[in-house]
Image: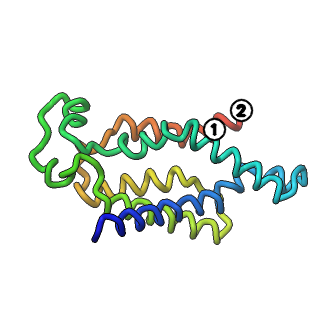
Amino acid sequence: MPEAVLALVLLAAGFYVGWNIGGNDAANCIGTMVGAQILSFRRAALLMGVFVILGGVLQGHHVMKTVGKGILITSPEQYEEVHHDDPPESMDHYFPEERLPDLAVFVALISAGIFVTLATFTRLPVSTSQAIVGGVAGVGIGMVGFDGSYFKMGVLVKILTCWVASPILCLFL
């Protein structure tokens, strides 16, 4: 596939996930205020749009780095840093460009997007973050199997711990 077409396909997949964030996660941000008639839907959506853009520009790179480079080990340097050992020879086979292959990125995005779309149409509030982390981990499993040496288990444990702790802590805040 030509690079320009591939770039457009990946961009479209990213837009699809972004649309899902608006469709599902927006309810988490503004649903209570709209439901309680504190703000009109239109005003709440406008405010949310402004602050989503600000958050993405000012802080989004932190989470982007975790999702894009923090879940899977895709380079010999990362492998040596995590395991203090030489990387397996198969590393070049799975990650020849020392990053997730474009097809893997596409599959992770589309998988997350489809899941969140289905949840949105069934009126279930779900986390797009959980969906995309699951998508990245899923493509990792699809590529290397359940070989844990290709995963940054410490990062995954931190993410999973936050997912479990978040609702519990919010009950008491």
Neighbour class for label 1 at 10 Å: few (<14), some, many (≥20)?
Answer: few
Taking the image as shown, residue 34 lies to the left or right of residue 71, namely right
In the rendered view, tell whether residue 46 sits above or below residue 80.
below
Residue 60's tag is: none
Report the residue at 18% width, 28% height from top.
84
In front here: 3 or 19? 3
Q: CA distance from mark 2 to mark 1?
A: 7 Å
Extreme front residue here?
4
Q: Is residue 169 left or right of residue 92?
A: right
Where disc 2 sits, the SS reads helix
Residue 35 in which image quadrant: bottom right
Q: Which mark is residue 172?
A: 2
> Counting other residues with Cα less than 10 Å from the Cα at mark 2, is it few (<14), some (14-19), or many (20 or more)?
few
* Residue 3 in the image, given as x and y percentages of width and height: 30, 64
| Residue 69 versus residue 12 in the image, above or below | above
> Which image quarter is the C terminus in?
top right
**Residue for point 56% across, 36% down:** 59
- Pointer 1: what residue? 168
117 left or right of 48 in image: left
Quarter of the figure that contains the N terminus = bottom left
Against 109, residue 92 (above or below) is: above
What element does badge 1 sit on? helix
In this orientation, which residue lies closer to the viewer: 109 or 28? 109
Residue at horizontal 32%, vertical 39%?
152
> Amino acid type of disc 2?
Phe
Task: Give yes or no for contact between labels 2 and 1 (Cβ–Cβ under 8 Å).
Answer: yes
User: Which residue corresponds to the image point at 38% horizontal and 62% vertical from the top-left?
Assistant: 7
In the image, residue 29 lies at what x, y percent? 72, 49
Q: Is residue 41 left or right of residue 141?
A: right
